[in-house]
Amino acid sequence: MNSDIKTCRVWEREHDRPVYTLASTCPVCGAEAVNSAPAPFDPADPYGEYRRALRARGQR
């Protein structure tokens, strides 16, 4: 799952604060823009199967 909002990859070195954009490059310095947030879950979650089973049974 990718977010549409991206941030400048080098904002900590080049800018005073994060620069957010929808483009693939930073509008200020031209550096690559990357996903602004990590995925909300780990696809390799070892307990995901059990959590989904509980949810399917209505216990969560």
Image: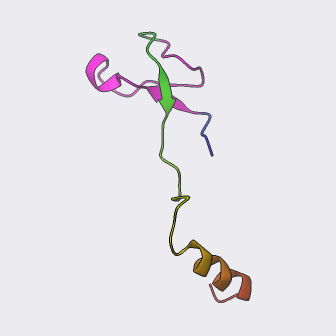
Image coords of residue 5 (percent x, y): 57, 33
Magenta stretch, main secondary structure, is loop
Q: Position of residue 27 (x, y in %)?
A: 50, 12
Tell me which corner region of the image, top left, top right, bottom left or bottom right, holds residue 51.
Answer: bottom right
Residue beneath the point at 41% across and 10% down = 29
**Quadrant the C terminus occupies:** bottom right
Could you tell whether 18 is left or right of 6 in the image? left
Q: Is residue 35 left or right of residue 16?
A: right
Q: Which residues are magenta?
A: 5-27
Q: Residue at x 56, y 58 (%)?
A: 43
Q: Residue 57, image x and y in percent? A: 72, 88
Residue 39 image position (x, y, % from top left): 52, 50
- List the single residue furthest toward the top: 29
Left/right of residue 49 with respect to residue 7 in the rendered view: right
Judge left or right: residue 16 versus residue 25. left
Give the colouring mode of the picture: rainbow
Query: Which corner quadrant of the image does residue 54 belong to?
Result: bottom right
Q: Is residue 35 above or below residue 33?
A: below
Residue 47 or 4: which is nearer the viewer? 47
Q: Is residue 9 magenta?
A: yes
Residue 31: which quarter of the image? top left
